[in-house]
Image: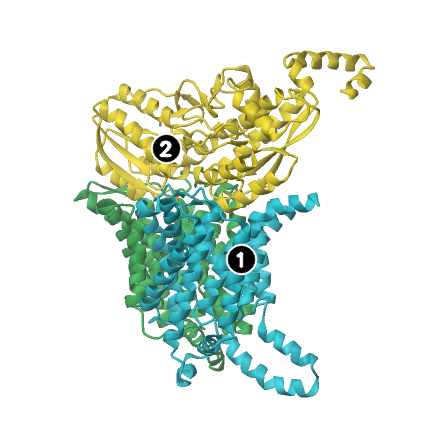
Chain colours: A green, B yellow, C cyan
Amino acid sequence: MQLFLEQLINGCALGSLYALFGLGFGIVFATLGILNAAHGSYASWAAIAALAAVEQLKLPFIPALLIGVLAGGLLAVVVDQVAFQPLRRRGTGMLGALITSIAFWIILDSLAGTATGQQSLSFPRGSYPGAMFHLGEIPLPAMQVITIGVMLGVTAGLHLLIRRSRFGAAMRAVGWNQTAASLGGVNPRYVVIVTAFIAGATSGLAGVLGGITTHNVSFLLGEGLLLKGFAAVVVGGYDDVRGTAVAGVGLGVLEVMSAQYLSSGLRDGITYALLLGFLLLRPRGLFGSLGFSRA
Amino acid sequence: MKSWSRRIASPTHAALAALAALALQGAPAAAQGLAPGDYKVGFITENTGALASAGQSYWNGAQLAAEEVKATKYLGGASIVLEAKESGSDAARAIQNTNQFVADPSVLAVSCCILSPVAGSVKPIVNEAKTPLVIFGATAAGLPQPPYVYSMTILPGPKDTATAVKVVDAIKPKTAAYILAADNDAFKGRMNATREVLEGKGVATAGVVNVLTKDTDFTAAATQAMGLKPDVILVYATQGAAAGAITALHDRGYAKTIVGNDVLSPAPIFKKMGDTVVGVPFPVSFSDAIVETPEAKAFVAAYQKKFNAPPDIYSAQGYQVVWFIAQGMKSLSGKPTREALGAALAKVGTIEHQVYGGEVMKGGQAETTGTLVVSWSPEGKIVPWVAPK
Amino acid sequence: MQPLVEFWRAYQSTVAFAIVNAFFALSTYSVLSAGILSFATVTYAAMGGFVGARLVLLTGLDPVFLLPAAMLAGAALAYLVALIFLRLDSHWMALASLALILITRVVVINVPSVTGGVNGLSLPVSIPLGVLVLLLLVAIVVYHRLSVSWYGIATRAVREDPAVASSLGIAPRRIQTIAFAISGAIGGIGGMLLALALQFLSPDTYFVNIAFTMIAGVVLGGSYHWVGAIIGAAVFTALPVLAQAVIPDFQEVANGVALLLIMIFLPRGLVDPRAIRLRRAAREGQGEALAAAVPAVAAARRAGGDAP
């Protein structure tokens, strides 16, 4: 029983990373209609930026985390304006955006490899909260608590932003039809930039937290998150952040439990089979709405 | 040799000439036979991609060796020039690079490969083109195929078992759990070999926890392994996975012995893992901290000076590739051909210039004797492993 | 003469890989020309590659005789995929095909009796470059005949607007299923050819990296004509080799930058039938041809602008 609870908590923490990443990915997909293959690189680079802040500038945990988040957001804006904006003007559609995002994926990943000296780096001990709490007999590292907490907070914040604020309404309007939105008094360019920033920032958050907990800061960090985050978006429903969060955590728990109780050879297979199943049978995901809205 | 007679004009040059003559005496009739000039060896580098940190070590070691061969005039007036082509550990690129090297008539030999499947793909090409291939890193047994395929990798398998036995004899555990990189066949073989020996010694297997080489999160695997309540955990995984698993185990408070493998030996591992890797025993064929012979000491000093970092087992293997080729070339005369070099390499028994304290070639495969079981000390030095009280 | 021979020997494997990639690009183009973005070529290639390799190892026959088996295996799998996936909206189709590739790798690892599992499969048989060129020529003839046939017109119609096409009596689902079958056949052949070129198969051989390369090749070459697929594949295979020769330190980044530049400046790819038609119209006479071309351009821009 104890083992089950331990693994459950592990799954929730892992899933929270997937959820955080999926939130950003899903927002871009739902609002801007772009399947962004470079999204994982934002996470890798945010982790690298945070590590640099810790090692070069000797900053403590929270400022370094904020620097990482900022880096992720800014990178996303740059990529959006350089890569996707010209395509938007031309109305090229999903394929063009996908290919361009692949181009940036290649560029950013190989630059990240050069930045880390092709190694997998770690955050030095002491640069992040390392306390170990105990829930009875079960060890609970502080980072796991932080990850789950952050995920819940960000999900709630994004949900309120998208559903209850004027900016959220503007985001959804731009996602439906940019021209119509601008007719309604929305500045689409501004909305697009802020949306890209938010997406990159959440990806960066996932990257920094992931880089700390897995002791792995390298270009591989983003790639691992990309596939699982994508699955979270599909299973949860691309246009509802709560669905993405639930699906992300669910996938994390499923992954850990199937490795523990079934076989880790099938671990990824189960995740992808679930992904495929949802795509075939219920493409809108668990909580998504019918109708495909994209730019 | 013309340049020498012109230079013997001043006393300094005479002294140099005397020294050079002394050096040459170590390699008499043969060096005079080999025509002077630069001889190209094609080196398929893996300086980018997932294995780049090891790849760069191999390449650095090879470059240092080529410099030394030239500086010590081991081959007389001849020297080895390395030409690099990057493969990023990708089989298709390695094949294309090999074809390009083989098509260049000035390339005498080729060196490649960390991944055994890639080495396997390259073998038929060099066999057909009758060009010697010296493998610097692939760990699968059975790759060498004289006269054209050789391997300077010190196979880690037998060292693993010796280490496990030494640890088990010292701490006498009742049960053992294994953490295995399930998608790496070489590690699977090594784990099974050790497991058989340990079970024969009465250490029951509590279970095997599977991870994947590309995994980044090991909390679940560590929890799983600890849930088996073993007295000792043995880790059989590549560098990233092994480091991750051991760190996760220590993070969750596992206090008993963990047995690592040779991937823990490079210095960046201590920098990355810090005190989570202290005290974990692992075998090492070469370490810059435990050097006995003068060649090894000179190698460490020269490498540190040139690359501003200490050498590791991968640097040593890359280094030996070039010295092995040089040793083969030394026995040739005139302008060497690829076939002649292949035949010469097949005849090499004991490696003359090596940093292990003893290296021989058996059937094209390099081997060293003895296993050193070491661990990292809290100060970041490699020291012989001592069992915990 | 000698430098030519050396050059050939050095780059013949690059040419071989370019031809293999051309097959993959043609396979992707086949479904793209019917309006579907699908990465499933990778799965068909895996099917053809492993089935073909196994048969070669079991029977010892010359691989050329076993190519039809790889082709049929690929086509059969593609037909199955079409039955299940064609119900999906085109955007979900792309995601589903991506998921299919991920699952393919898991399956490959877990069926060692066929695929050799994690160890991979060694295939000590090769195929002469001449045979590869011959096969490519056959494929070219087939694609040309298809594009000028009723099928070609039907696919263009389905791509532009499936609703209009069906009102004209063309069954989009049927055309798309045929497109899938062709894609599977060509993909299966390509997969087996890749196996013969590498002489070693591992679970990573048929995975996401070639998926993105082949789609980039199709888009780069021009996704509106089958010639574009071949040219794009050739360019995309040669690019890394060129980058390695010219700027070895930044070769990886160079590929991404090249792709980015193409997408920004030549989004319809290198071979663009519309651009060719417009240029021809402009050349043939300023006034009348232009006046006639304007409505055509307007229509094409409306249609071409948001088609995938």
Q: Position of residue B94 (x, y in %)?
A: 53, 42
Q: Is residue C149 above or below residue B246?
A: below
Q: Position of residue B226 (x, y in %)?
A: 25, 36
Q: CA distance from mark 2 to mark 1?
A: 59 Å
Residue A289 shows which numbered tag?
none
At 49% from the left and 30% from the top, the residue drawn is B314
Mark 2 belongs to which amino acid? Thr
Q: Do badges 2 and 1 share one subunit?
A: no
Mark 1 belongs to which amino acid? Leu
Q: Is residue C257 above or below residue A181?
A: above
Within the image, what quadrant is residue A173 found in? bottom left
Q: Nearer the viewer, mark 2 or mark 1?
A: 1
10 Å crowding of disc 2: few (<14), some (14-19), many (20+) = some
Along the horizontal axis of the image, is B245 left or right of C293?
Answer: left
Q: Nearer the viewer, residue B354 or B348?
A: B348
Q: Is residue A102 visible?
A: no
Q: Position of residue B204 (x, y in %)?
A: 20, 28
**Element class at badge 2:** helix
Which chain is home to disc 2? B
Along the horizontal axis of the image, is A6 left or right of B64?
Answer: left
Residue B276 shows which numbered tag?
2
Within the image, what quadrant is residue B386 found in? top left
Along the horizontal axis of the image, is A37 left or right of C76?
Answer: right
Q: Nearer the viewer, residue A220 or C153?
A: C153
10 Å crowding of disc 1: few (<14), some (14-19), many (20+) = few
Residue C134 shows which numbered tag?
1
Along the horizontal axis of the image, is B328 left or right of B161?
Answer: right
At 56% from the left and 69% from the top, the residue drawn is C268
Q: Position of residue B107 (x, y in %)?
A: 63, 35
Which chain is home to disc 1? C
